[in-house]
Amino acid sequence: MAQEFFPQVQGRIPFGGIGSDDPVAYKVYEPDRLVLGKRMEDHLRVAVCYWHSFNWPGSDVFGVGTFDRPWLAPSMEPMAAARLKLAAAFEFFEKLGTPFYTFHDRDIAPDGATFAEATANLHAIVDEAEGHMARTGVRLLWGTANLFSHPRYAAGAATNPDPAVFAYAAAQVKVMLEVTKRLGGTNYVLWGGREGYETLLNTDLKREEQQLARFLGLVAEHKAKIGFTGKLLLEPKPQEPTKHQYDYDSATVHGFLARHGLETEFGTNLEANHATLAGHSFQHEIATSIALGLFGSIDANRGDYQNGWDTDQFPNSVDELSLALYEILRGGGFTTGGFNFDTKLRRQSMDRLDLFHAHIGGIDTLARSLLVAASMIERGTLEANREARYAGWQGDLGRSISDGSATLESLAAAALDGAIDPSPVSGRQEYLENVVNGTIWAIDAGPATKNRG
Ligand code: XUL
Ligand code: CO
């Protein structure tokens, strides 16, 4: 029998119900439960990420790894370790019962002494991943290339002052885009790892912007050439690892794409903790990306209110995620995207079982937030209020402004003769906040025990 890495969990995590005391059962997440006529699993499209969950030993800047992960033992031969890691990851995906995963080229297979060796390593492990995917039915939400860990990328990849580094990064993305297509990935993500600057004293901002645009143009061209039908997504982040990252937030990314004629080629992969690092709420970033036509996918996590870095904790706030889910449902839901758990355990959560607790809690939080958001959509109170607030734009005055027939002169004339005399109206913010809280408190999270259906 194949080696078992998570013997504490036998079979797929069951649905236990809201009253369940079983720590390894879902309390809310039921893949087949219909919400607004669609299965919960198809709404949320949950993915597990490879890098934090399988390729990180629990190290931090002050200390070495703490996690019980035999496949990360430095004494192992790298390809044998990669195979063991793959088997452990797929055992976890299968037991968790989630439909997708995500990975960087260098998470899944070891780097090589040359580009050719690294690429051969990747292809060999991808051959095996293909087998695991066929066996388990787990799919790829997105692939990506690690263009930030190796010292050659210390000054960026596409925005590096050295064109040879640009070329190396381009080669890596070509390979990984093709791997993503081969594995049926529904998106390809480009997080701007070190595309930013440490100091303006040595940085040519204008040139670096042009380099980045050229790089993304090459990626879009290659996508068309190979017939990859998934979406290309940029992942905004304001800082870390660089002092200033160019893909600061959704609005900045949109401005950049529009300046270079790339706005129809790329969308966004939004991460909760990146939104908060940018001084925004997660809801703001989602609403902005939807309004700008960029919304693609989500990296689910949360930060810590007391510190200003990317702690990548598992999400646990229904209050916050209900608003995020509400924006997503209002916007029509995911098409190719989903909720990828770009999340890290705390360093003291060293047992392999902690990985289950963390994901189960995060997924249940998403599931419960989905129910709240769906209820807010069904009740329609927020939407009716929003429509009423803008109703004037359907009248004669509003239409004449929108269709361009009004001029400053005609508007001034109307104001002068007293035809225009607006009176302020309440924005009703506290009432609307009560509507949200009222829904969170009232929502039926499902049966107390597992006898659903
Ligand atoms: C870094 C981050 C990355 C990307 C993939 O903050 O979020 O893990 O999601 O490169
Ligand atoms: Co991310």
Image (cartoon, rainbow, N blue to C red):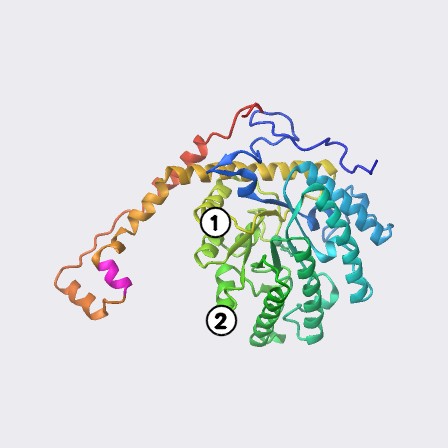
Q: Is residue 66 magenta?
A: no
Q: Amino acid at mark 2?
A: Arg
Furthest residue in direction left, as rendered: 417
320 with respect to 396 (left or right): right
N-term-proximal mark, 1 vs 2: 2
Q: Which secondary structure lies at badge 1?
A: helix
Residue behind mark 1: 283
Towards the viewer: 42 or 76 = 42
Q: Is residue 369 left or right of residue 391?
A: right
Extent of the magenta region: 397-403
What is the number of callouts on the image? Answer: 2
Return the x and y of residue 138 as percentages of the image width and height. Answer: 67, 44
Q: Residues within 10 Å of mark 2 (few under 14, many from 20)?
A: few
Label 1 with label 2: CB-CB less than 8 Å: no
Q: Nearer the viewer, mark 1 or mark 2?
A: 2
Q: Is residue 89 visible?
A: yes
Q: Quadrant of ligand 1?
A: bottom right
The amino acid beneath tag 1 is Gln
